[in-house]
Image: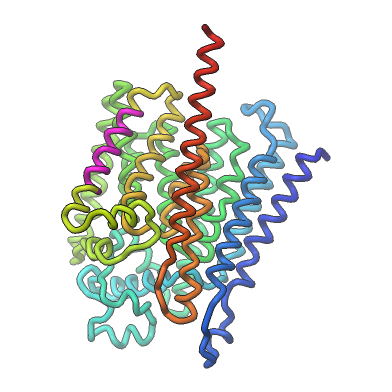
């Protein structure tokens, strides 16, 4: 066995142990029920260390993973190595199903919203602190910090919550965890298929062993796990040139969480630039028609799927370096104008990139999808680590150093759990924002300089 393969297997063992550490990080029921007043908690610190260690082993596995001699025809040894990586990713996702969601209270919010919808109560119009919900609150125990706000989740997300809640309080959490685990596994399988089609099988560790995709689906059980699955599905139908199913998958992703709708822009523009007008039209029409059907059915059922997303972005501030900085310079309407202006400029730059870039069409489109998903995330006032799960899928298909660094460092914001879990104090520190922003910008500038230098050297050698 070569030293490279020894390093590869060592990284798989190290990664597995870092993920299994969740069973030790998870607060025990005895400790939670204790009457002793806590003055501190280490869950946030332990979670950060877990993410960083797991990320280190993921990168190690990626770099040590052997590239196929012939990507179109794998040797039995190469096939077994890639099968091992995928199998390990699946096993670890299943292993975390019994873990309680100790990094956030979102699961409790999901299930209570789902219970309301299942009972015929519109969670888009009825906040959790409504007096008529007292009996249900006593039974289901939704998080108090969400009590004043009606739901903000799109209709298909709410339907998944309702399916989970329909199984009763005893089984609702397990049902939801199964949904997120299956979504995460399907994401892995679809991405593995895409990597095989792209002849990039050696990128498998970036999707199979992504700590963000594994821990945020297994421990956090976040809705973004399903959004990541929708993103993988979108790329799958795009690769196989199925415009009707592509549009349907974009609509499904949008009706689960809004971010996948952004992917329509680079898909449409690149198709137009390549004069594939029928593909652009069918994809767009299929997307819009599917959204009309989904939202029309929601209104027909008596729900008004508007929710509190506007209030959410007005009230909440977390994890966004750029927005935090802009808010120190501007406020009120001026801040909104600045954000909208930056968004418009960003869209124009993405369009220019898609038109002028000399990358091959596959990489150009994947890069455009990464950029268009990044743009709203960096301009929003709220970035929780799990918001980056769809980007983690795209990063595995076409890795970029700045994107991988952002995904790996986003969990630094979990430091807020230390004070929140012990003392119910929500007071995010600024150092995670500074470290993340400086690291991402530095890596972006460094890689840009290296690429420009390489291009200049190539041009000089041709002359």
Left or right: residue 243 versus residue 332 is right
Highlighted range, magenta: 339-353
Return the x and y of residue 92 as percentages of the image width and height. 62, 59
Magenta residue check for 55:
no
Residue 166 in sight in this render = no
| Residue 272 vs residue 39, the one in the foreground | 39
Prevailing secondary structure class for the magenta stretch in the rendered image: helix
Residue sitting at 54 percent across and 60 percent down? 215
Residue sitting at 42 percent across and 29 percent down? 364
Give the vertical position of 254 relative to 447 (above or below).
below
Colour treatment of the image = rainbow
| Residue 422 vs residue 62, the one in the foreground | 422
Question: Farthest top residue?
Answer: 463
Give the vertical position of 188 relative to 19 (above or below).
above
Q: Considering the image in quadrants, where does the N terminus appear?
A: top right
Magenta residue check for 350:
yes
Residue sitting at 72 percent across and 32 percent down? 75
Give the total of numbered labels.
0
Left or right: residue 227 versus residue 127 is right
Return the x and y of residue 280 as percentages of the image width and height. 28, 31
Give the vertical position of 137 relative to 1 (above or below).
below
| Residue 185 vs residue 356, the one in the foreground | 356
Residue sitting at 21 percent across and 57 percent down? 331
Question: Farthest front residue?
Answer: 329
Question: Farthest left residue?
Answer: 333
């Amino acid at each position: 066995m070569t030293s490279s393969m020894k390093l590869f297997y060592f990284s798989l063992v190290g990664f597995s142990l870092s993920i299994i550490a969740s069973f030790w990080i998870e607060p025990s029921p005895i400790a939670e029920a204790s009457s002793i007043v806590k003055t501190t908690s280490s869950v946030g610190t332990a979670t950060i260390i877990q993410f960083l260690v797991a990320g280190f082993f993921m990168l190690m596995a990626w770099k040590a993973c052997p590239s196929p001699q012939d990507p179109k025809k794998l040797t039995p040894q190469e096939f077994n190595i890639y099968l091992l990586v995928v199998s390990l990713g699946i096993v670890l996702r299943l292993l975390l199903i019994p873990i309680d969601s100790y990094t956030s209270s979102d699961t409790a919010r999901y299930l209570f919203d789902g219970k309301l919808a299942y009972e015929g109560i519109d969670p888009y119009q009825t906040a959790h602190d409504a007096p008529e919900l007292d009996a249900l609150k006593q039974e289901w125990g939704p998080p108090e910090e969400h009590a004043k706000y009606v739901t903000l989740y799109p209709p298909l997300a709410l339907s998944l919550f309702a399916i989970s809640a329909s199984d009763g309080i005893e089984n609702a959490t397990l049902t939801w965890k199964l949904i997120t685990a299956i979504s995460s596994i399907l994401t892995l399988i679809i991405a593995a298929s895409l990597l095989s089609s792209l002849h990039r099988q050696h990128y498998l560790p970036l999707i199979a062993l992504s700590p963000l995709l594994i821990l945020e689906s297994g421990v956090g059980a976040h809705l973004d796990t399903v959004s990541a699955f929708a993103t993988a599905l979108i790329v799958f139908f795009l690769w196989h040139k199925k415009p009707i199913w592509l549009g349907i998958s974009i609509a499904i992703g949008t009706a689960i969480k809004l971010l996948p709708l952004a992917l329509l822009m680079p898909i449409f523009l690149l198709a137009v630039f390549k004069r594939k007008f029928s593909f652009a039209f069918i994809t767009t029409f299929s997307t819009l028609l599917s959204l009309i059907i989904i939202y029309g059915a929601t209104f027909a059922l008596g729900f008004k799927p508007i929710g509190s997303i506007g209030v959410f972005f007005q009230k909440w501030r977390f994890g966004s370096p750029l927005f935090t900085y802009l808010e120190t310079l501007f406020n009120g309407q001026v801040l909104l104008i600045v954000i909208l202006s930056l968004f418009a400029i960003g869209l124009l730059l993405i369009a220019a990139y898609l038109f002028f870039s000399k990358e091959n069409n596959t990489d150009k489109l994947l890069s455009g999808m990464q950029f268009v998903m990044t743009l709203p995330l960096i301009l929003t006032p709220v970035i929780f680590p799990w918001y980056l799960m769809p980007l983690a899928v795209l990063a595995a298909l076409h890795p970029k150093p700045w994107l991988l660094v952002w995904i790996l460092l986003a969990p630094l914001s979990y430091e807020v759990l230390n004070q929140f879990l012990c003392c119910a104090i929500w007071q995010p520190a600024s150092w995670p924002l500074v470290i993340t922003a400086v690291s991402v910008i530095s890596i972006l500038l460094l890689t840009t300089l290296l690429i420009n230098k390489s291009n200049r050297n190539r041009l000089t050698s041709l002359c």
